[in-house]
Image: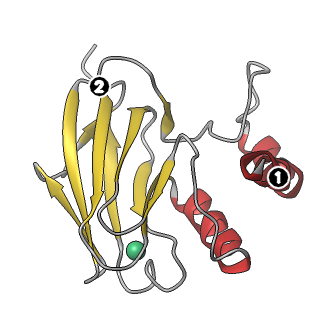
Amino acid sequence: MMIRIVFVFLASSFAPVLLAGGANDHGHSHAHESSVGEAAAAVPDRIVEVAMLDSMRFVFDPELESLVAGEVVEFIVRNDGRIRHEFSVGNAEEQARHAEMMRKMPNMKHADPNAVTLDPGETGVVKWRFAGDDTVVFACNIPGHFEAGMLHRVKIEAGAS
Ligand SMILES: [Cu+2]
């Protein structure tokens, strides 16, 4: 139910942005179509563990310094802190909108394909197929966390064909 409300909120508030960005090309546009790819059910090309810490850091294992268009990465995310954290995938603009929404509804817990919100000790999975050549922003949008540095940016490289 919560997801549906959020979806409607996103769709109504940001439709002009989506249209301006030309994201609506094949008529199957939805809230999680992004310039950096989409959630994927495919077998992952690689698996990356992500620890979320109260020092407002993501620790990627192995380190995540590059991404290639077309690859599917499964992120196994674990909250090693004592407070709630979130791991979300998006471009800079999407993360800014998401942060704004979180400021309005700070207790919202995500079950969206592009994000997991985890209480201390919890584990979650985000599986994502990267596409395009934008810069991915991995972010925790719990109010104050992004501002404190809880983000990681990686530019998507063109894939070998
Ligand atoms: Cu956080």
Quarter-of-image position of residue 35: top right
Q: Amino acid at mark 1?
A: Ile
Nearer to me, 81 or 32? 81
Residue 45: x, y in percent? Answer: 23, 24
Which mark is first along the chain, 2 or 1?
1
Residue 67: x, y in percent? Answer: 27, 40
Q: Is residue 158 visible?
A: no
Q: Is residue 13 left or right of residue 77?
A: right
Seen in the picture, residue 161 relative to 37 is either above or below; the reply is above
Residue 95: x, y in percent? Answer: 56, 63
Write the residue at 82% across / 52% down.
5
**Residue beneath label 2, please?**
159
Q: Is residue 35 left or right of residue 97?
A: left
Mark 1–mark 2 CB contact (< 8 Å) = no
Quarter-of-image position of residue 43: top left
Residue farthest top in this picture: 161
**Residue beneath label 1, please?**
5
Q: Is residue 77 left or right of residue 4?
A: left
Disc 1 element:
helix
Residue 55: x, y in percent? Answer: 25, 84
Residue farthest left in this picture: 62
Q: Nearer the viewer, mark 1 or mark 2?
A: 1
Quarter-of-image position of residue 42: top left
Q: How far apart in space, not on screen, are marks 1 and 2 (Cα)? A: 36 Å
Disc 2 element:
loop
Write the residue at 58% across / 61% down.
109
Seen in the picture, residue 116 relative to 157 is either above or below; the reply is below
